[in-house]
Amino acid sequence: MTLRSHTHGQPIHSRHRGGAVVIVALACLLIVTAIVSNMLTSAVRARQQLHAERDRRQAELLLDAGADRVVERLTADPDYRGDTWELLPEEIVGHGAGRVTTQLSQTGASGGWQAHVVAEYPLGRDFPVQRSRTFLISPLTAQSQE
């Protein structure tokens, strides 16, 4: 014997089963939405980390280039005391401009030099990556480059 609903003529247990199916479907939809949301969040985070690593690596490469440039400039011009080297995005990798600042000071009577190099990349952002290095250049190093 099946009980019939007075309003629609359907069996009562059939209506409850339909409601349960809707609840299960909604729960599955919520789970799938949470998984997809988590995947998208992870992808965005990985992309941001990749860009940050690229910027750090580019700043380190600019720092190395700036250190080489100091030695080269000092060799070519004994009166060289440093400068600021501005690089356009097209001159680097196209993602941002860079700046390398160098300062030279003489170290005592030995005739050597202390070089301080600072690289910043990318310029124009709130927090560009900044790397610096201080090193000594002996008089022989500057002369041997000639």
Image: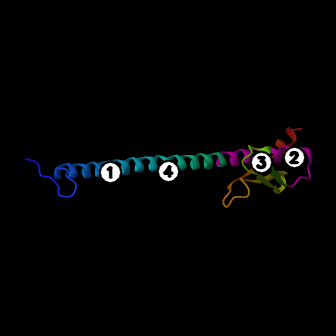
> What residue is drawn where x is 59% and y is 45%?
50
Residue pointed to by mark 4: 41
Residue 88 in view here: yes
Position in image of residue 71 (x %, y %): 82, 45
Q: Is residue 8 left or right of residue 104?
A: left
Q: Earlier in the sequence, mark 1 or mark 2?
A: 1
Q: Earlier in the sequence, mark 4 or mark 1?
A: 1
Callouts 3 and 1 close, C-beta under 8 Å: no
Q: Earlier in the sequence, mark 2 or mark 3?
A: 2
Position in image of residue 126 (x %, y %): 67, 61
Say whether residue 64 is magenta.
Answer: yes
Q: Earlier in the sequence, mark 3 or mark 4?
A: 4
Q: Secondary structure at mark 1?
A: helix
* Mark in front: 1 vs 2: 1
Residue pointed to by mark 3: 89
The residues tagged by marks 4 and 1 sit, at their Cα atoms, a distance apart of: 21 Å
The amino acid beneath tag 4 is: Thr
The residues tagged by marks 1 and 2 sit, at their Cα atoms, a distance apart of: 68 Å
